[in-house]
Image (cartoon, grey):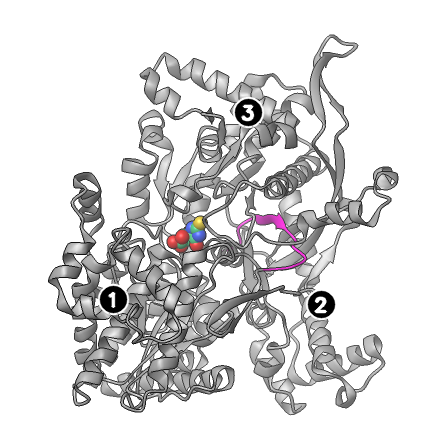
Amino acid sequence: MALDKEMFKKELRQRLRENYAMELEDASEQEIFNTLGALVKARYSDAWGDTWKYYVNKKKKQVYYFSIEFLPGRMLKSNLLNLGMLDTAREALTDLGIDLDSLAEVEKDMALGNGGLGRLASCFMDSIASCGLPGNGNGIRYDYGLFKQRFVDGYQVELPDEWLQGGNIWEVRRESKAVDVRVGGHVYLAENSEGKLKPIYENERVLRAVPYDTGMVGFENNVVNTLRLWSVEIPDSEEDKYQSIQGRRELEDLTAVLYPDDSNEQGRLIRLTQEYFFVSAGIQSIIRRYKKRIGQPISKLSEYVSIHINDTHPALCVPEMMRILVDEEELSWEQAWDITVKVMSYTNHTIMAEALEKWSIDLMRRTLPRMYQIMEEIDARYVQTMRELHPHDLVERTRIIRNGQVHMAHLAIIGSHSTNGVAKLHSDLIKSVVLHDFYIIYPDRFNNKTNGVAQRRWSQIVNEPMSNVLDDVIGKTWRKDSGDLKLLMNYQSDQVVLERLAEAKKVNKQKLADYILEATDINVSTDAIFDVQIKRLHAYKRQLLNLLHIIKLYQDLKENPNVAMQKRVFIFGAKAAPSYHYAKVIIKCINEAARLINNDSDINDRIKIVFLPNYNVSLAEKIIPAADVSEQISLASKEASGTSNMKLMLNGAITLATLDGANVEIRDAVGDDNIYIFGLTEKEVYEYYENQEYTAQKIYDENAVIRRVLNAFIDGTIPNIVYEGREIFDSLIKYNDEYFLLRDFDSYVKAQEDIDKAYGDRTFWQKMSLINIANGGRFSSDETVRRYAEDIWKIEPKDSFVTEKG
Ligand code: GL4
């Protein structure tokens, strides 16, 4: 039954009394938040149980999305919205003198991911449930999420993220579903009494994997799926092995922290054990459930179960499934292999060579001896089969075990029936370059699934002012079907609508300006262009190119204070992996340039730099609705897709981009006139690689503007960066500018000048902004997961049903 405002208030008070023996007036914000969370959870717990029963009773095929990262951020408002309770909750709380938005800030971000990859997994969880698709997440419940970032003297400092401190209201610990995972020791094969070869384990360690489940609430459809995250514990049977505190700590450390590096993994033992831990626990629980609930022979597994390998971190799904089917279920190798390949599918998320995971044979053998044996067998059989079909060197290059290393991407491709990229350009590149050898061998396995974003969160929840205008202008159907945003195209010349959208943007900018003042003490004007670059700090994403342009503007203004230009606020949000030295150097330089420019009275507030610390999902929710310009300036070919580019356009920001990742599709959606494109194309980049004719020094020698900008890093113009400035300078000149910043500089400056002019023409700008909003619907993750469901997972949505309790 729907909860009305009065009932809501009554229930909140009653629950506070029951749980804390307190009246509302005496409760802390945390206590009220926890109580509200419990109230919300109670509203979907029936549907959660019923969804599960429905899938089992109807023997629905389900997908299990295995990902070492999930990045849901805060869940209160999203759950309220999806349950249709957001307005009621807001009004009821207002009556009680509580502001929902401030209360929501009490929730700690669930930050069990680094960036785009983990956030995509969470957008998918939302969309899978909202589309009524039978799908679950499987990952790790880290005790500490991604580190908190502070700036001290302009340098990044990392602090632990103690997200579980206030308790986690959404999760349910399921002790009874725990499973054991075996690692280390030795394994050899011996005949059992029936004459079958069976693995014998010696001196292995047994880890207990305990699942914590979180309901993934679908949008107004009574569907609640499950995100299952595993935590390590010591099994009772092993208690006596862990008598020292240090021994216990070591074991418990396994799920303590998320690796803070999103694309440059170093082969560490604990990371490999993490990967196996959640893979083994997840697959064991799937098989256990299948046997108990579905009651079909194991040979039919692929008709009921699909497993998705999100990037290579869960690639051990392949040998682990083989282990269970062969060692435990006693299927033949051939039969087990056939099932495994049908069940598994894999997404590649990057072409950066350093992120293509490899493990040394030695480490693999020591840590996961049975997995290694199985991978050796897979590899040997692969070679045997392919030798007859393909040239020797091609087969050698694509082997799983090669040059002393285990290649996880090779394992994922060979052991699954589908490999996809995450934007058209990226999928083309993996076919033609990065994984070209595999494309020759398995042409039918390759496909594209362009990323998408959870549009309800990234429009309705984060941008109420814009949403209200949209409701008035095009009706409310866009809230359910974001394709209806297209209706807005009919109003591109309607002054009133354009003005109202601009007003909404202004409200969001003021809110962000208030936050900036509070967080950094910097005063910014909402008349300025809010120019935003928010993403992990990586050389290939080229935050440095953005900085070079800012320095150029600064030098222009110093030279001639009367230069005509719009006011601009350059907003950055970016964490650097703690071990990524160069990225940290860039952070320091941006912070020092900010200090210089923001305090220079000659500049007189015409340009400002704001580097907001601790970029995370919640901060993105504040920045994105307020953005005018969306910087997507990676070197073409390097960004697999990007997803903040989609969120920003959906909120009416104009994209300034290279033709990289999904930017290409954004351009196709909005048309050339409503986006600013610059720089080398991916083809030109590859030509440079082939001809090896790029010389940064030459550009520096010939281009006076560039020379002046680069010299600012070493001649004291930007203070306090004696070492960092030199490092930047050398990376560009001495080490020949790996990401072609200098080559793209002039066309970037030109595009920025065009933006400057366009912003001066209010109507022109507003119209571009409207067209971006109207075409944002194309990048909904609802659509993306439907494509995965139809083409790869072969799962069907639930027929519409009503939970038993109504
Ligand atoms: C990433 C890509 O870098 C990013 O372009 C993409 O949008 C995201 C989701 O597909 O995956 N790959 C890795 S690794 N981290 C990412 O964010």
| Residue 486 shows in this picture | no
CB under 8 Å between discs 3 and 1: no
Judge depth for marks 1 and 2 and give the one in front: 1
Residue to which mark 3 is pinned: 375
Mark 3 is on which residue type? Met
Disc 1 crowd, CA 10 A, few/some/many (<14, 14-19, 20+): many
Observer-nearest of 748 and 766: 748
Q: Label 3 crowding class (10 Å Cα cut-off): few <14, some 14-19, many 20+?
A: many
**Tag on residue 165?**
2
The picture places residue 255, in percent across and down from the top left corner, at 67, 50
**Where residue 115 sits in the image (x, y, percent)?**
48, 58
In terms of sequence position, does the residue under pointer 2 or pointer 3 come before the other? 2
Identify the mark nearer the N-term, 3 or 1.
3
Q: Secondary structure at mark 2?
A: loop
Which quadrant of the figure contains the C terminus?
bottom right
- Which sits in the foreground, 603 or 294? 603
Tell whether 280 sits left or right of 437. Answer: right
Task: Give the SS element for disc 3.
Answer: helix
Residue lying at 30% horizontally and 68% vertically, measured from the top left: 714
- The residue under label 1 is 710
Where residue 457 appears, as percent x and y from the top left, is: 48, 68
Q: Amino acid at mark 1?
A: Leu
Q: Is residue 407 above or below residue 108?
A: above
